Image (cartoon, helix red, strand yellow):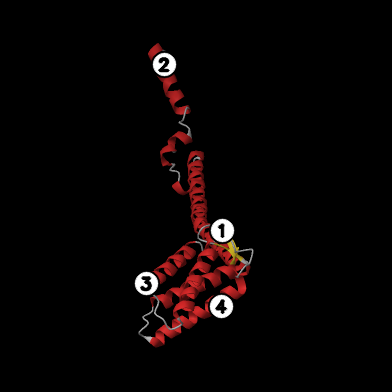
Amino acid sequence: MPTNQILQGMTSFLSSKIHQPPIFNSINQITPEKENKPRSSCHIINQDTWCSKRHVLASGGISLVSVLSLPPLAWAANEQEEKDESLVGAFKSLFDPNEKTKSGKVLPKAYLNSAREVVKTLRESLKEDPNDMAKFRRTADAAKESIREYLGSWSGQKTVINEESYVAIVKAIRSLASFYSKAGPSAPLPEAVKSEIMSNLDTADNFL
């Protein structure tokens, strides 16, 4: 048999015996469903990371709101403390027997109140029009009463006898008493005497 015929016969025989594996024949028919396709680990990690970021942002937002809400509360607490301290200070001042004067000295509160009343009422009586007898008498009586109480409580008291306010008030009272003892209780007060008394009252007021 010729060689060519033998080769052709072998080729036909091998072709008939060797078949393409089924997997290759059906590979184009296989289409994986997207629903069942497993997600890559990268996608899962990215999603988890995003969720974590959202959680951090949310937590951070809550914390930020909390922090921002603290200062007003702190201010309110500080204001309340200041009010409490003011009330305590006022309470202590109410029961403190002493008081600081304009000049910075600390003197008995009772003395200062009495001295201020003398300065106030005596000034008013000196400024009052003597022609209006009703008002003049009312202010003069108020001045007499305050002078009487002042001298009755503080005349010669060692705690205040050397104070500038005490010395000035005593001078004003003596000038007034000296004039009326000589001119009579109904005599009009001269401007010179009135000016001297007012000057002493101003001096006393500066030290009260």
Q: Mark 4: which amino acid? A: Arg
The residue wearing badge 1 is 105
The residue wearing badge 3 is 191
Report the front residue among 47 and 76: 76
Q: Nearer the viewer, mark 4 or mark 1?
A: 4
The residue wearing badge 2 is 7
Q: Mark 3: which amino acid? A: Glu
Most extreme residue toward the bottom, as rendered? 134
The residue wearing badge 4 is 148
**Left or right position of 23 against 4:** right
Q: Residues within 10 Å of mark 2 (few under 14, many from 20)?
A: few
Instruction: Identify the element where label 1 is drawn.
Output: loop
Measured in 3D between alpha carbons, the distance from the residue under mark 3 to the one under mark 2, in whole angstroms, is 161 Å
Mark nearer the N terminus (4 vs 1):
1
Q: Is the residue under label 3 in contact with that under label 4 (CB below 8 Å)?
A: no
Q: Mark 2: which amino acid? A: Leu
Total numbered labels: 4
Q: Nearer the viewer, mark 4 or mark 2?
A: 4
Instruction: Identify the element where label 4 is drawn.
Output: helix
Mark nearer the N terminus (4 vs 3):
4
Is 187 located above or below residue 99 in the figure?
below
Give the x, y percent position of residue 77: 55, 60
- For the point 39% across and 87% down, the residue is 133
